[in-house]
Image (cartoon, helix red, strand yellow):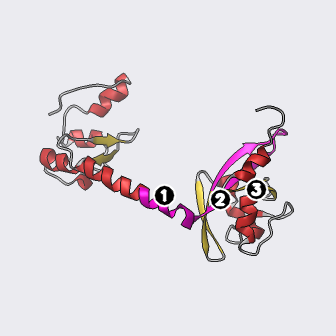
Amino acid sequence: MGDSFNAQVLLDFLGHGVLVVDKSAKIIYANKSAKKLFSSFATIVCYSSYLHEIIPSLAKEKYPLSWEKAGLFELRGQDIVAFASKFADKKGDELSILVIQKLEELEPLYRELIMIKQELEQIFNSSYDEIFTTGADGTALRVSAEACRRLYGVEPEELIGRNVKELEAEGYFRPSVYDIVMRDKKRITVMQT
């Protein structure tokens, strides 16, 4: 992009608020959207502010350096979503970048995701063929409802959360596809009883 590229100029064009804070939670950068978001609550974002001063609901022990994915906080009656990520600057100092947005602005996307999730669940659960998903440890996460009732004579909730080794020992199926896949580390096709 060349030497004339300036990350701050780019961040100012984002529709999401962006804050960068140091290890002491002092704000060292705020893009235009962040300044606008906080100024709408009559709070001034300046580089001498600390995060907990502009977002009182964030106690120091909830400082974003400990966040792993996202946080929801309240700012003067408004729900705000913040996605935090750690990084180190050129000097090696630990910083956090927060991408923030009003929750209400995410609601249309959230509604669409819920609708898609419901459609996928209907397809999943009405499948004649069994779809059985597990976690890396062999814990049953999902079982297609129609096939579960037909093959095992039970509701999916009776299998979900249980380990496939336990289910195999109780005679639900044999052999455990999970065990073979974990051993061979490849896609397999096998007949189960």
Q: Quadrant of residue 129?
A: top left
Position of the N terminus by quadrant? top right
Say what amino acid the circle numbered 1 marks. Leu
Mark 1–mark 2 distance (CA, rounded to whole Å): 16 Å
Dot 3 corresponds to which residue? Answer: 31
Q: Position of residue 149 (x, y in %)?
A: 15, 50
Tell me the kind of residue under disc 2.
Ile
Q: Residue at x 77, y 44 (%)?
A: 7
For the residues labelled 3 and 1, the Cα–Cα distance comes to 23 Å
Residue hosting label 1: 109
**Rendering coords of residue 38 (x, y %):** 73, 68
Residue placed under numbered mark 2 in the picture:
100
Is 13 left or right of 122, judged from the image as shown? right
Image quarter of the C terminus: top left
Instruction: Point out the stretch of residues depicted in magenta.
Output: 83-112
Q: Earlier in the sequence, mark 3 or mark 1?
A: 3
Q: Report the Cα–Cα distance between label 3 and label 2.
A: 11 Å
